């Protein structure tokens, strides 16, 4: 069995990974491999090429490639840091590999799952209410309805 765990900087995604390692992966050696997937969204500050920032009436400024390169490097470092923490949770318990992609997390997790032909997609839940979920969207809800594999949504324990 192959599984993917969606990882971001949230406590909920790390809880989902920890839960899966403890309750799924440690019991009997399955899955054979887990993929830790981190999706970072394209920079909203500079957008996609060509990037243009309005600087005044009739004037448009294009950020230098140095600024874009610096921002990309910072995003890559943040992604590497997040996945490094996730790999520590997996160490000595399950074989893990990592993948970093850019795009909308809900779309990319479904695409990665299909492309890698996985059996199970595991995502954490932030526990948004109906109203917040309607406005903010829900990665776990979207994946549950659109992924072509089984989806496990791990909810964190309720805080009393």
Image (cartoon, helix red, strand yellow):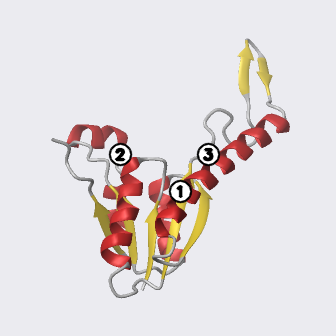
- The extreme left residue here reads 160
Residue 145 found in image quarter: bottom left
Is any atom of residue 147 visible in this view?
no
Callout 2 crowding tier (Cα within 10 Å): few <14, some 14–19, many ≥20: some
Vertical arrangement, residue 64 with respect to residue 125, above or below:
above
**Disc 1 designates what residue?**
85
Q: Return the residue nearer the eye: 90 or 53.
A: 90
Residue 42 is labelled as: 3
Marks 1 and 2 sit apart, C-alpha to C-alpha, by 26 Å
Residue 121 relative to residue 53: left or right: left
| Coordinates of residue 13 in the picture (x, y in percent) | 40, 55
- The extreme front residue here reads 92
| Coordinates of residue 14 in the picture (x, y in percent) | 41, 56
Please tell me which residue is depicted at 79% across the width and 24% down the height of the picture: 61
Kindly check if marks 1 and 2 are in contact, taking CB atoms under 8 A apart as contact.
no
Q: Return the residue nearer the eye: 160 or 107.
A: 160
């Amino acid at each position: 069995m192959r599984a993917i765990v969606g990882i971001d900087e949230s406590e909920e995604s790390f809880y989902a990974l920890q839960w899966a390692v403890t309750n799924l992966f440690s019991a009997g050696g399955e899955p054979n491999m887990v993929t830790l997937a981190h999706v970072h969204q394209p920079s909203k500050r500079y957008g996609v090429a060509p990037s243009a920032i309005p600087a005044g009436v009739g004037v448009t400024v294009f950020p230098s490639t140095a600024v874009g390169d610096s921002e990309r490097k910072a995003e890559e470092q943040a992604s590497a840091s997040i996945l490094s923490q996730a790999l520590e949770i997996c160490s000595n318990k399950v074989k893990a590999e990592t993948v970093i992609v850019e795009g909308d997390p809900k779309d990319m997790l479904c695409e990665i799952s299909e492309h890698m032909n996985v059996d199970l997609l595991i995502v954490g839940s932030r526990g948004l209410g109906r109203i917040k979920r309607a406005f903010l969207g829900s990665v776990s809800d979207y994946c549950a309805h659109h992924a072509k594999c089984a989806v496990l949504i791990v909810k964190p324990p309720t805080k009393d």
